[in-house]
Image: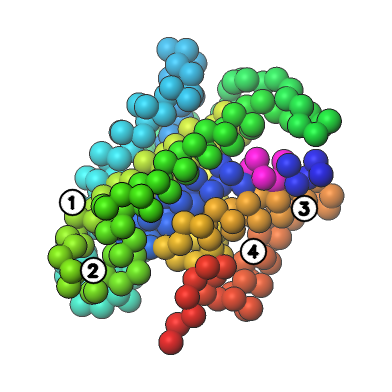
Amino acid sequence: METIVTGVLLGGTYALVALGLTLQYGVARIMNLSSGETLVAACFIAFWLFTSYQVNPLWGLLIIAPIAFVVNWAIYMILLRPLVDRAKTQGMLEVDSILATFGLLFLFEGLMRRAFGGAYTSYAFLAERFEIFGRFYGLNRVVAFAAACVIAMALYLFLYRTRYGTAVRAVAVNPNSANLVGIDIARAAALSFALGGALTACGGALISTFYTFNASMGVVFTMKALIIVIMGGVGDVRGAVIAALILGVAETFVTGLIDPGLTLAATYALFTLVLLFRPQGIFGRQQA
């Protein structure tokens, strides 16, 4: 039971990060390899706000999320929109976006190294025990999980209870058909990319409350988010959440019962099994 609860708490924060990449890849059709750097940058900003100005990381989300939204909107409009306009096929866009965001990965990592150095960083926030089913867990993990659930629910309500959210989901399913019914695909893609960046930053700020991080670990989170997105089904919010919980439990199980050094190996083994037996993901549609 302890392993499952710990895994669910971890998976909840993973889900928020994966939802960001789900919007960017599923709607904007941009494979953002610099997603992890957005997460790590949010970790450092949350750390800086907390240690320098005593800003609670939860309140810090009100600063971090808008900044991430604006930065990602600018990245899309300045760097990625020209790639979208010139791409003749979806495959061409994916290759171009991978190359462009791969370059951003190194740019952002270099800037963070310059600003914060290469050492591992952490800070003490709600470093207390919290009892669940007779076992004790870190209160910071529980609060991060609860905050991630609230943000994910807000995203769900936006996507499934608002008119513009329906338009975003329509673009994710079939951009050509969405265009035929008058949906502004370019605007929906820009909004989704920016919103995805804001969600990733929120996930980073929450993860920073219980995780030790440094400027070079963004690629690890990018790979985990990518695995979750593909496991859940590209563009599917429900699948991303379930896949994140599965990954969190799997990582916790391997860490606690086998060997912490095998965590990444177990993650990729799970990913390989999904590719072999259900390549479209948990909720993904089988290709015709």
Q: Mark 1 or mark 3: which comes first in sequence?
A: 1
Q: Is residue 218 magenta?
A: no
Residues in magenta, as a range:
6-10
Distance between the alpha carbons at the discs numbered 1 and 3: 42 Å
Distance between the alpha carbons at the discs numbered 4 and 3: 12 Å
In the rendered image, residue 95, in percent from the top left (x then y), is placed at: 33, 70
Q: Which residue is mark 4?
A: 268
Q: Which residue is mark 2?
A: 178
Distance between the alpha carbons at the discs numbered 3 and 2: 43 Å
Residue drawn at (45%, 62%) of the image: 236
User: Looking at the image, do the residues carrying marks 1 and 2 touch, with CB atoms under 8 Å apart?
Assistant: no
Q: Residues within 10 Å of mark 3 (few under 14, many from 20)?
A: some
Disc 3 residue type? Val
Q: Which residue is mark 1?
A: 78
Disc 1 residue type? Ile
User: Looking at the image, do the residues carrying marks 4 and 2 touch, with CB atoms under 8 Å apart?
Assistant: no
- Local secondary structure at mark 1: helix
Q: Mark 1 or mark 2: which comes first in sequence?
A: 1
